[in-house]
């Protein structure tokens, strides 16, 4: 293995200051997200989702942001998955976006809640048919002995929904929206003296501060 401890990168692409950011963190996020899209960052909507189980053990995985609606971050999943079960037990969670091409990171801490079924079904039926079948077929996070089990379930569902391009949404599948309580914007700077701008919500009002790197 390479000498991991010696791996380094100097950051120098941009700067970030309290006086230059938007007063609203959602507007600031939207600006950065659009810049990530323009810069052709691979999957700019990929975000790490961290949850905690009933024993206090954390878990994280990458999911895809599917919208910012009513100042909340929206994603979809199987409610019976590990993350779904953990969010039902403890809705507190954290999201992290990392756009290395722009030397930027955004961290979000907040509380997740389910979106209504009508919104979830509208999005579900906008997905490619194969993705709709996949959501029906996969008992997400459950132990399975072989991939053939999934393939058999897919074939059974293909037969069941033959001729249908738009499928009904499975009851176990839906969306969450994360109401942010804290959003931090990180911009890489030289000599590890990075810029960190922190937004915290206090009685519905966002306060802005700088953090030491």
Image: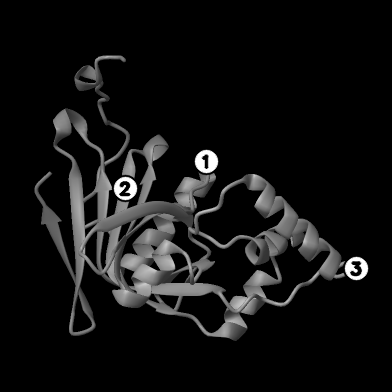
Say whether disc 2 or disc 1 marks the residue closer to the N-terminus.
Answer: 1
Say whether disc 1 or disc 3 marks the residue closer to the N-terminus.
Answer: 1
Choose mark 2 or mark 3, whichever is in front. Answer: 3
How many other residues sit within 10 Å of disc 1, few (<14), some (14-19) or many (≥20)?
few
How many other residues sit within 10 Å of disc 3, few (<14), some (14-19) or many (≥20)?
few
How many other residues sit within 10 Å of disc 2, few (<14), some (14-19) or many (≥20)?
some
The C terminus lies in quadrant: top left
Q: What residue do we see at 20% from left, 64% from top?
A: 56
- How far apart are labels 1 and 3 at the CA level? 34 Å
Q: Kindly identify which numbered label has been placed on residue 163.
A: 3
Res. 189 image quadrant: top left
Locate residue 68 relative to residue 29 in the image: left or right: right
- How far apart are labels 2 and 3 at the CA level? 44 Å
Say whether disc 2 or disc 3 marks the residue closer to the N-terminus.
Answer: 2
Residue contact at pointers 1 and 3, CB within 8 angstroms = no
Q: What residue do we see at 71% from left, 59% from top?
A: 153
Front one among 209 and 45? 45
Front one among 11 and 118? 118
141 shown above or below 200: above
In terms of secondary structure, where does tag 1 sit?
loop
202 shown above or below 129: below
- How far apart are labels 2 and 1 at the CA level? 14 Å
Question: Can I make out residue 161 in this image?
Answer: no
Residue beneath label 2, please? 105
12 shown above or below 33: above
In terms of secondary structure, where does tag 3 sit?
loop
Locate residue 145 relative to residue 56 in the image: left or right: right
* Residue 80 percent coordinates (x, y): 48, 70
Residue beneath label 1, please? 42
* Residue 195 percent coordinates (x, y): 19, 45
């Amino acid at each position: 293995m390479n000498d991991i401890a010696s791996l380094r990168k100097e950051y120098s692409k941009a700067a970030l200051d309290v006086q230059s950011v938007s007063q609203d963190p959602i507007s600031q996020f939207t600006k950065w997200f659009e810049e990530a899209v323009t810069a052709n960052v691979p999957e700019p909507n990929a975000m790490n989702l961290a949850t905690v189980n009933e024993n206090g053990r954390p878990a994280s995985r990458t999911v895809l942001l599917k919208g910012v609606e009513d100042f909340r971050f929206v994603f979809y999943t199987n409610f019976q998955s590990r993350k779904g079960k953990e969010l039902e037990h403890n809705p507190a969670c954290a999201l992290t976006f990392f756009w290395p091409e722009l030397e930027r990171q955004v961290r979000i801490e907040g509380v997740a809640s389910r979106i209504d079924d009508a919104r979830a079904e509208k999005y579900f039926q906008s997905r490619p048919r194969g993705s709709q079948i996949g959501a029906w077929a996969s008992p997400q996070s459950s132990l399975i002995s072989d991939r053939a089990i999934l393939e058999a379930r897919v074939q059974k569902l293909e037969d069941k929904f033959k001729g249908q391009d738009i499928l009904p949404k499975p009851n176990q599948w839906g969306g969450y929206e994360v109401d942010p309580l804290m959003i931090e914007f990180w911009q890489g700077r030289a000599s590890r003296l990075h810029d960190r701008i922190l937004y915290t919500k206090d009685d519905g009002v966002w306060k802005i501060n700088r953090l030491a790197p």
